Amino acid sequence: MKIDSDTSLFCLIGNPVSKSLSPLIHNISFEWNKINSTYLTFNVEDLEKSIDGIKALGIKGFNVTIPYKEKIMIYLDEIDKLAKDIGAVNTVKNIDGKLVGYNTDGLGFIKSLEERNINLNNKNVLILGAGGASRAIAMTLANEGIHKLHITNRTIKRAKNLVSDINNTYENLDVKFIEKNNIVDCYDIVINTTSIGMFPNIIDMPIDPSIFDDDTIIYDIIYKPRPTKFLKESKKQNKITIDGLDMLIHQALLSENIWLSENLDYFLMKNNIKKRIMKNNIEINTNK
């Protein structure tokens, strides 16, 4: 796409950002939708100065990744309710110098289920892990009519803090911490949000999938490798398996909907982006 004086600029800030897939995803989308925009990455050492630069350059919107998803919040003029509940921002819209923060991580997860016609109403869900991704997914799931949400984590205090935060926000949801060794309930969906099984530790699994019923959906948000051993073993047991690449692409395209104030037809576009990634055998990691 030709870049000229009318081209709008969007970007990713974080540290590190060199292996991010965001430029690929967004620039394919801009080209597909004939939008005169481009997307760059900036490795940021000083967050405050980078925010000043974004305003000065008139950058229309930007994504935020590690380690700034929480730190960015004090520099924003307004924050969406879901992002406040999550306690982190991954998307910012610049409206004439007014910075508004959002979080599309959990929504990207939901979209990846919707495209498979998976209905979350009254479902029982187990989340493995209690970090930032777990928080984003858990808080978003709480809005989707699920019946039960259990969270397990190696660091018990962190998991219990997350459970407490969810209970304080969504009083009518059955949310509790559960020790991994005590998992006996039947779950409709099990979600791995930990880094266990991620490259280079590809022989590890967060839990043995055989303890779950055959009709349990096993979701691993890791997408390097694809599939993880956790998903390979689950598939051998004829379980439905989903990896994290669709979530990644969806959360990125949801950012565009926010920046451009329009609903793009991104289910078809998402599949095009996914094909481009796989065709080129592009190295992928967990930085957004």
Image (cartoon, rainbow, N blue to C red):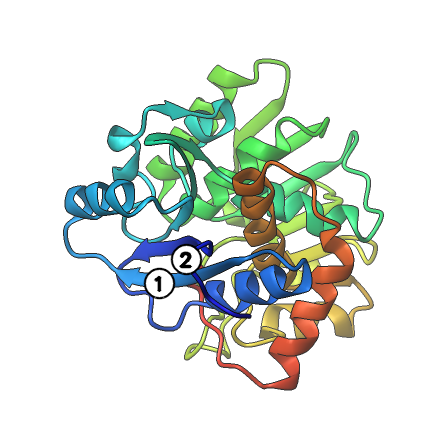
Q: Position of residue 238 (x, y in %)?
A: 82, 68
The answer for how far apart the CA atoms under marks 2 and 1 are is 20 Å
Quarter of the view holding residue 235? bottom right
Q: For the residue marked with disc 1, what is the amino acid?
A: Thr
User: Which quadrant, please, contains the C terminus?
Assistant: bottom left
Q: Is residue 195 left or right of residue 214?
A: left
* Mark 2 crowd level (few <14, some 14–19, many ≥20, 10 Å Cα): few
Q: Is residue 179 left or right of residue 275?
A: left
Q: Nearer the viewer, mark 2 or mark 1?
A: 2
- Taking the image as drawn, is residue 240 in sight? yes
Q: Is residue 10 left or right of residue 213?
A: left
Q: Position of residue 271 (x, y in %)?
A: 73, 66
Q: For the residue marked with disc 2, what is the amino acid?
A: Ser
**Residue identifier under label 2:** 5
Q: Does 28 sit above or below residue 171?
A: below
* Mark 1 crowd level (few <14, some 14–19, many ≥20, 10 Å Cα): many
Identify which residue, 121 or 6, lies in the foreground: 6
**Residue identifier under label 1:** 41
Q: Secondary structure at mark 2?
A: loop
Identify which residue, 231 or 207, lies in the foreground: 231
Specify which label sits upstream in the sequence, 2 or 1.
2
Query: Residue drawn 33% across and 44% down?
Result: 58
Residue that sits furthest to the front in the current view: 5
Q: Position of residue 39 (x, y in %)?
A: 44, 61
Query: Residue drawn 44% across and 64% down?
Result: 286
Query: Residue drawn 15% across and 45% down?
Result: 49
